[in-house]
Structure formats: structure tokens, C-alpha cells
Amino acid sequence: MLPALRRGGGWMFRRLAQLTLPDIADTQCGFKFFDGPLVRAIVSSCRIDGFAFDVELLARLSREGRAIIEVPVAWSDVPGSTFSARTDGLRSMADLLRIALSR
């Protein structure tokens, strides 16, 4: 049951994130590179401190007209995630709504 809930929640999260960042295929991949001074300036105004913080950071960069370039990487899932679909899922969805409305 839980793997199905997690997959369904992940699908919904990606769809909701695409409402804010339609050109970004994967907002949650932890493999990100940024220009140091730029990201420090942007992150100081970020408010999301949960699993959706990447979406807020990318949304703020996008709203400032900054280029976001996705580069494919080989990825394999490793057991041991701290994300709980039951406890973190609703908060993450609410955070996505806050990001979308923060224009």
C-alpha cells in the first residue's frame, strides 16, 4: 500500500510543481549546481523549509528570468529516504500551493 501511496503522491507532486515550473521536468532531483552569489541572494528570500524548498528556489530563479538548464544524470534510488508520504505529503502539497500563489 505505502509504495503505491508514495508513487501516487510523487506523481501528484510533479504535476502540481509543473503548474509553477512547466519547463522543468524534475524539480526534486538533489543533483543541482548554482552560481554561488546568485543562489545566496535568492535563498535569503525563500520561506519554504520542507521537501518543496527546491521548487521555491527554482520558481524564484525563473521569475527573475534566470536560465535553468536541466542536464540528464544517471540516477538510482537508494532505500532510506526520510520522506513519509503520510506525514510529509500534505505539507509538501500545501507548500506547492504557497509557492504558486506567491507571485
Image: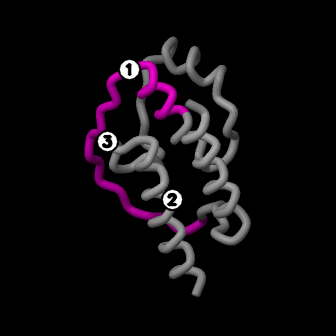
Q: Residues within 10 Å of mark 3 (few under 14, many from 20)?
A: few
Name the kind of residue labelled 1 in the image.
Gly
Residue 36 on image: x %, y %: 49, 17
- Residue segment shown in magenta: 57-80
Which residue is located at x 44 percent, y 64 percent? 77
- Relative depth, front residue between 42 and 20: 20
Q: Position of residue 17 (x, y in %)?
A: 47, 50
Judging from the image, what secondary structure is the residue with disc 3 in?
A: loop
Counting residues from the start of the chain, the first of labels 1 and 2 encountered is 2
Q: Disc 3 versus disc 2: distance between alpha carbons?
A: 15 Å
Q: Does the rendering let one see residue 17?
A: yes
| Image quadrant in which you'd find residue 84 | bottom right
Asked which secondary structure carries label 2, the reply is helix
Mark 2: give few (<14), some (14-19) or many (20+) Cα within 10 Å. some
Asked if disc 1 and disc 2 are in contact, CB closer than 8 Å, the reply is no
Q: Which residue in the protein does label 1 denote? A: 65
Q: Amino acid at mark 3?
A: Asp
Upstream in sequence: badge 1 or badge 3: 3
Can the viewer see residue 29 in this picture? no
- The reply to whether callout 3 and callout 2 are in contact (CB within 8 Å) is no
Q: Is residue 68 left or right of residue 3?
A: left
In the rendered structure, does residue 59 fall within the stretch colored magenta? Answer: yes
Q: In the picture, residue 53 is in which quadrant?
A: top right
Q: Which residue is mark 2?
A: 13
Q: Which residue is mark 3?
A: 23
